[in-house]
């Protein structure tokens, strides 16, 4: 026998939604609320409803789990919004909301999908989920955050099973085009010099040793993650200073304006699909 949800056991309910086994649970709810929230249910309720011998009102069995169905109903009913802590939970609820065409619930879930806690920690998964449900705005937002990851080295996840080759190629193409453009910008200005590296030829352009190191490592980093977060960090520049001569650290400080300009140029490159 199915359990009854403690949050959805209204005395004036006129329909029961029963979640899937093994945790089958009855949700005693209102047709009027479901009909307003969902064209799917609105149409269903125009059809004759079969009566069940073990219930005083009709029962509709659904394929969603107890958790997913309860979360979805909390988004539909005027009650405190539920806590959705993982992308797995969000995907299950979004799948149900899309199935029943619950636009208001979908809008809430779309905003949650690209919230910092998800899009910053798992941008590739967020992109895959957004692409799966054809959420173009959210896919575009997530694509920008994927620039901080190496998409060719990200863990395989079931979410990737549900997206098209076209959606995946768009993401790869963004990374490739932005990396190529960033590498083309990675050129040293004639004004940036190091007194010791240039020595007697200080009046003749010669790339400082710190720049040779910086350029080589930056090229590798930008090919994998075409963003400026790493290559212009203090830690990254400190390694280049250590790889140079005794005066390279001072040369890097003198090149602050050049580096800042270079960073802005890379940041200004197209960053979304």
Image (cartoon, rainbow, N blue to C red):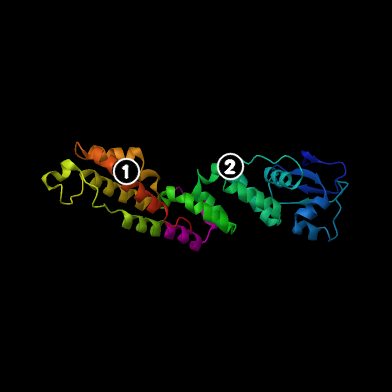
Residue at 35%, 58% (x, y): give it: 180
Which residue occupies the foreground of this view, 119 or 209? 209
Report which quarter residue 54 is drawn in: top right
Which quarter shows the N terminus? top right
Which residue occupies the foreground of this view, 6 or 255? 255
Q: CA distance from mark 1 to mark 2?
A: 41 Å
> What is the residue that sits farthest to the left in this orientation?
200
Look at the image and say whether residue 87 sits in the magenta stretch. no
The stretch in magenta equals: 154-174
Report which quarter residue 28 is drawn in: top right
Of callouts 1 and 2, which one flags the residue occurring earlier in the amino acid sequence? 2
Judge left or right: residue 256 versus residue 170: left
Residue 142: percent from left, percent from top: 51, 51
Judge left or right: residue 270 versus residue 99: left
Label 1: which secondary element: helix
Label 2: which secondary element: loop
Which-is-in-front pick, marks 1 and 2?
Answer: 1
Q: Is any atom of residue 210 visible in this view? A: yes
Residue 153: percent from left, percent from top: 40, 49
Disc on res. 86: 2
């Amino acid at each position: 026998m199915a359990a009854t949800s403690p949050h959805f056991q209204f005395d004036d309910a006129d329909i029961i939604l029963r979640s899937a086994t093994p945790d089958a649970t009855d949700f005693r709810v209102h047709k009027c609320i479901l009909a307003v929230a969902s064209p799917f249910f609105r149409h269903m309720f125009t059809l004759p409803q079969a009566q069940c011998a073990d219930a005083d009102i009709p029962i509709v069995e659904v394929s969603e789990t107890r958790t997913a169905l309860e979360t979805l109903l909390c988004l539909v009913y005027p009650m405190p919004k539920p806590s959705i802590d993982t992308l797995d939970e969000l995907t299950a609820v979004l799948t149900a909301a899309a199935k029943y065409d619950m636009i208001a619930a979908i809008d809430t879930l779309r905003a949650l999908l690209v919230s910092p806690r998800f899009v910053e920690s798992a941008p590739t998964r967020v992109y895959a989920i957004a692409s799966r449900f054809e959420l173009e705005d959210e896919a575009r937002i997530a694509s920008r955050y994927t620039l901080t990851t190496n998409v060719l080295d990200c863990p395989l996840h079931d979410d990737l099973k549900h997206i098209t080759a076209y959606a995946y190629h768009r993401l790869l193409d963004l990374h490739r085009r932005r990396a190529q453009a960033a590498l083309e910008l990675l050129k040293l200005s004639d004004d940036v010099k190091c007194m010791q590296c240039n020595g007697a030829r200080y009046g003749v352009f010669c790339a400082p040793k710190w720049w040779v190191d910086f350029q080589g490592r930056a090229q590798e980093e930008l090919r994998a993650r075409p963003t400026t977060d790493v290559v212009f960090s203090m830690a990254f520049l400190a390694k280049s200073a250590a790889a140079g001569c005794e005066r390279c650290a001072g040369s890097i400080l003198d090149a602050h304006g050049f580096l800042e300009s270079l960073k802005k140029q890379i940041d200004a490159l197209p960053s979304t699909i």
